[in-house]
Amino acid sequence: MPTAPPTNQPRRTLLLTGASRGIGHATVKRFSAAGWRVITCSRHPFPENCPWDAGPEDHITVDLASSTDTTKAISVMKEKLKAQGSRLHALVNNAAISPKKEGGARLNTLETSEGDWKAVFQINFFAPVMLARGLMDELVAAKGAVVNVTSIAGSRVHPFAGAAYSTSKAALAALTREMAADFGPHGVRVNAISPGEIETSILSPGTEKIVAQIPQRRLGQPEEVAKAIYFLCTDNSSYVNGAELHINGGQHV
């Protein structure tokens, strides 16, 4: 279990999108246990029954599907970061959507509406680069790190993930490399994690058939993904930049 930093060191800050469940939920727990301040972003208000130590003052309500709303939220984020010297030590772009057909089946390229294509790319691709660019000064001040959450679906046709989701994640992987080249000279590292089949509440029926083909023969746990995110946001990965870390039990081989 990570421990909080010594009191003579400044508290580090994480800004996380998509924190309400699964990987995001586990990431909040991991960083909070290590003493980080965690600022969460969601289109939903802060829930009254939320277990986080931080209250609604460290939650930002934002609709990442709207570029206008995202731009406004960046201003709010910058204001919240002033309390810690306008420094942001880590930005984790975890929020994503994957529209489904009725009954939960995947939407292929012929079935996905133009509106769905645009919404998926706005949240899964454009929002991450908007946030990173908008918070560039704060990331540079902290010599911070950016972690983009991609997916194994970005490298193959997945039986459950739709075409818009998969192509947005492939684009996000390419964006990670471009950002690493652009942000690196400013002291900011940019990497990605690519989860495979992770045991969360949104697993699709039939996942057990995929598990039988994974070398480790099991689903991954959200906590295992959170550990990798934490690694990429700390000095333990100080010379890792532009990488995409596969967290899938060998499913990609």
Image (cartoon, rainbow, N blue to C red):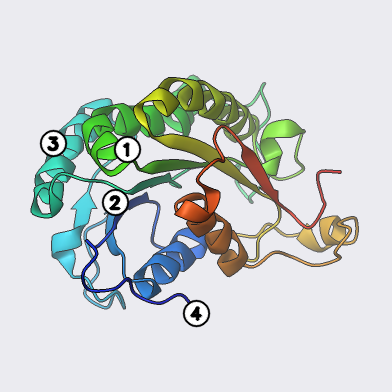
Q: Looking at the image, tell me whether mark 2 or mark 4 is earlier in sequence order.
A: 4
**Residue contact at pointers 1 and 3, CB within 8 angstroms:** no
Q: In the image, what residue occupies the spot 52% across and 55% down?
A: 236
97 up-or-down from 131: above or below: below
- Say which of marks 4 and 1 sits in front: 4
Q: Looking at the image, tell me whether mark 4 or mark 3 is earlier in sequence order.
A: 4
What separation in Å lies between label 1 and label 3 (alpha carbons)?
Answer: 14 Å
246 up-or-down from 170: above or below: below
Which amino acid type is shown beneath numbered disc 2? Cys
Which amino acid type is shown beneath numbered disc 1? Leu
Q: Residue beneath label 4, please?
A: 1
**Residue contact at pointers 1 and 2, CB within 8 angstroms:** yes
SS class, disc 2: strand
Residue 35, x across and y down, in percent: 32, 71
Q: Residue beneath label 3, please?
A: 75
Q: Which mark is residue 41?
A: 2
Residue 34, x across and y down, in percent: 38, 71
Q: Looking at the image, tell me whether mark 1 or mark 3 is earlier in sequence order.
A: 1
Q: Residue beneath label 1, please?
A: 64
- Say which of marks 1 and 2 sits in front: 2
Taking depth in this image into account, of 16 and 60 the one nearest to the observer is 16
What separation in Å lies between label 2 and label 4 (alpha carbons)?
Answer: 25 Å
The reply to whether residue 53 is visible in this rendering is yes
Q: Is residue 222 left or right of residue 211?
A: left
Which amino acid type is shown beneath numbered disc 4? Met
- Say which of marks 1 and 3 sits in front: 3
What separation in Å lies between label 4 and label 1 (alpha carbons)?
Answer: 32 Å
What separation in Å lies between label 1 and label 2 (alpha carbons)?
Answer: 9 Å
The reply to whether residue 99 is visible in this rendering is no
Residue 70, x across and y down, in percent: 24, 34
Residue 178, x across and y down, in percent: 51, 21
Characterize the local packing of mark 4: few (<14), some (14-19) or many (20 or more) Cα atoms within 10 angstroms: few
